[in-house]
Amino acid sequence: MKKILFSAALMMGFAVVSVAGTPKSESKPTETQSTNKSGQSLYWYDVVYDGSHQDGYVPNGTTPEQGERSEMEGDCPQGEAKLCKVGFQSQQTLPISSENLGNATENITRSN
């Protein structure tokens, strides 16, 4: 009887150790999770608003600034809460329509 209890306890111990030692799979960010790449240098484009583009766009001829988010945030004046800058991992073909602004790796919004 003692051998059976000892064997059962030993098997349970192995089971706990094997489960505890199994690495957990890394979860990929969902659309609602932040994908902030802190410290990553991106190509930043100023978002322009006008009568024809009330949702914003990046016009032809815009030269991107390259740098980290923290370097770009000070360039956005206070005002109506709208996109100020969008950052991409690579240079983009211009113009960038309002529909494609959401494809940016990061964005900076003006504060009120």
Image (cartoon, grey):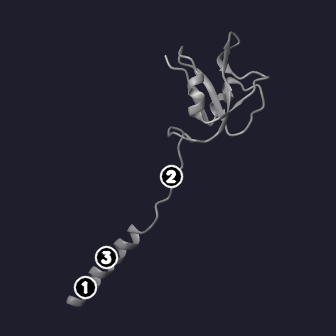
Farthest residue to the top: give it.
Answer: 51
| Mark 2 and mark 1 residues within 8 Å of each other at the beta carbon | no
> The N terminus is located in which quarter?
bottom left
Q: Which mark is residue 6?
A: 1
- Please identify the quarter of the rendering in which residue 84 is found: top right
User: Going 68% across and 12% down the picture, which residue do you hit?
Assistant: 50
- What type is the residue that disc 3 sits on? Met
Residue at coordinates 53% horizontally, 43% vertically from top-left? 30
Q: Position of residue 62 (x, y in %)?
A: 75, 24
Residue 102: image location, x then y, percent: 63, 31
Q: Is residue 103 above or below residue 48?
A: below
Rendered view: 106 above or below 24: above
Along the horizontal axis of the image, is 111 left or right of 105?
A: left
Residue under numbered circle 2: 27
Within the image, what quadrant is residue 16 found in? bottom left
Q: Is residue 76 left or right of residue 65?
A: left
Which one is in front in this view, the residue at disc 3 or the one at disc 2?
2
Label 2 or label 1, whichever lies nearer to me, is 2
Q: Label 2: state its secondary structure.
A: loop
Q: Nearer the viewer, residue 107 or 8?
A: 107
Mark 3 → mark 2, Cα distance in angstroms: 29 Å
Residue type for callout 2:
Ser
Quarter of the rendering containing residue 94:
top right
Are the residues at dot 3 and dot 2 in contact (C-beta closer than 8 Å)? no
Dot 1 falls on a residue whose secondary structure is: helix
